[in-house]
Image (cartoon, rainbow, N blue to C red):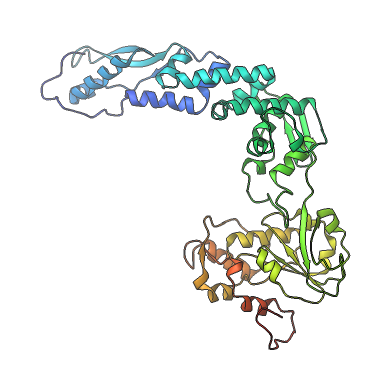
Amino acid sequence: MPAEAPGTRGATRTGGWTTLATLRAQSLKAWDSGALLRELLDPTDTYPRRRPLKRPTAAGLRTDYAAAHGWATELFAAAGPFTLETADVGRTTIGSNRLPAAAVFATVDDEIAFAGKTRDAGRFRKLAGGLSAVDPGLRQWAWKRPLQLLALGDAALTAGRVALWLRDNPAPGIYVRQLSLTGVHTKFLETHRRVVDEMASVLQPAVSGSAGTVSAGTGTHAVETVDGADQADGAPGDTVPGSASARTPAARFAARHGFVHPPELVRFRVLDPEIPLLGDARDVAVTADAFRTLRLPVRTVIFTENLVNFLALPDRPRALALFGAGYGFSALRDAAWLRDCEVLYWGDLDTHGFRILDQLRSAHPHVASVLMDRATLLEHQDAWGAEPSPARAELTRLTPEESALYRSLADGEFGAGVRLEQELVDWDWALERLRPQGAASPNRPRGEW
């Protein structure tokens, strides 16, 4: 370019031209998408890669020559990882100006260097090579998840060894704890179940389990994710009443790969001292299968998710209390005898409490809520807390009154994220509303029916 035109010194506009920062952002975007790493693993005809540059027009040179001069100078100075194609601009108006027209990266390594990721690319090559050494089929997973491979580091190699073991030992019939591989323990699998599942899907055409199916697909680099609920441990559906392990991602992982998993447990208290159980035992936990087969002379079941509430419920004829732990009701779904009982659900008075109620009704539509009403909420304003992430899903199994209160909570009618935890409800207020219909309200010691 010729020297600056008079009167243009100090101009700073770039007029939408492709700056060096813009060009680097394009390369970083390709890195962040995993495209550059995939190119390292499986070269295509992408390179040499030509990236066109938006450049000044002849009119732009006339009006903002200094800015155009600075723009071009910066690009020419940065050339090295790329070469510049140029174009002649303004020959018939302002005079011949040779401007950058395109940046050309000869190889993917050149573009990676320009993005400042050479060291990471070296680590990726080493890790991908390590996975291929475990089994050549794992190269597919590395191609599909290149950035995850970098983030996992050596843990990816350990996960690969687990996936290979699963291929060679279908339905092992042991607990995960008994898996004897160096560096593999229960905590490792809790953290990396999804990765192991995906790698196993690459190494095996199909791994079937009660919770879902892993398929390697038919494409060259196909990797399907297994069981969406496993993608984020702790999501709705991960727990069942009375058990921290049943229907969790850990249980589904065990089922898919043929491991033995501890049975899900249901904890309950018989509230009627006249009902014989196991000697003097009234607070017991049984497997879900055993709970399904119970034959007790019970007509009322009170389901609460707070341990102290569960323990403090007073004696009541022909009744038992169930202790729950959040979403998921597989243990109750098969207990057909509950359909002949009055089932009361007492949960937190917040949006997730109503979501749990809605899900419980998918198993037992006759469940009635208790202490989850507007009067209880307004009576306890001094005990209100904040729900971090209110639910907003459409719930179809609520009564009109429940649905109206759910929407009021979700929409912030009482304030942002208002919630009333069940353990903060006044105990006498609670007992008054839990009392059997038609029962008198005699003078009684505090906390008794």
Quarter of the image containing the N terminus? top left
**Front in this rendered view, residue 78 or 348:** 348
Q: Name the image quarter holding the C terminus.
A: bottom right
- Residue drawn at point x = 70 percent, y = 80 percent: 448
Name, please, the residue furthest toward the front: 280
The percent position of residue 2, horizontal first and vertical second, equals 18, 13
Which residue is found at the position 67% from the left and 71% from the top?
370
Q: Is residue 398 visible?
A: no
How far across and down, in percent of the image, does residue 240 sit? 72, 54
Which one is nearer the viewer's eye here, 10 or 385? 385
79 up-or-down from 177: above or below: above
Residue at the outermost bottom position:
443
- Looking at the image, which residue is at 30% across and 21% down? 55
Looking at the picture, tell me which residue is in the foreground, 127 or 355.
Answer: 127
**Residue 223 falls in image quadrant:** top right
Residue at the extreme left: 6
Q: Count numbered badges in the picture.
A: 0
Compared to 83, does 192 lie above or below?
below
Q: Is residue 68 left or right of residue 350?
A: left
Q: Report which quarter residue 267 is drawn in.
A: bottom right
Q: Is residue 334 left or right of residue 421?
A: right
Left or right of 374? Residue 89 is left
Where is residue 375? Give x, y as percent: 58, 76
Residue 227 can be seen in this image: yes
Instruction: Pick whichever, 63 or 144, lies toward us.
Output: 144
Q: Position of residue 203 (x, y in %)?
A: 72, 24
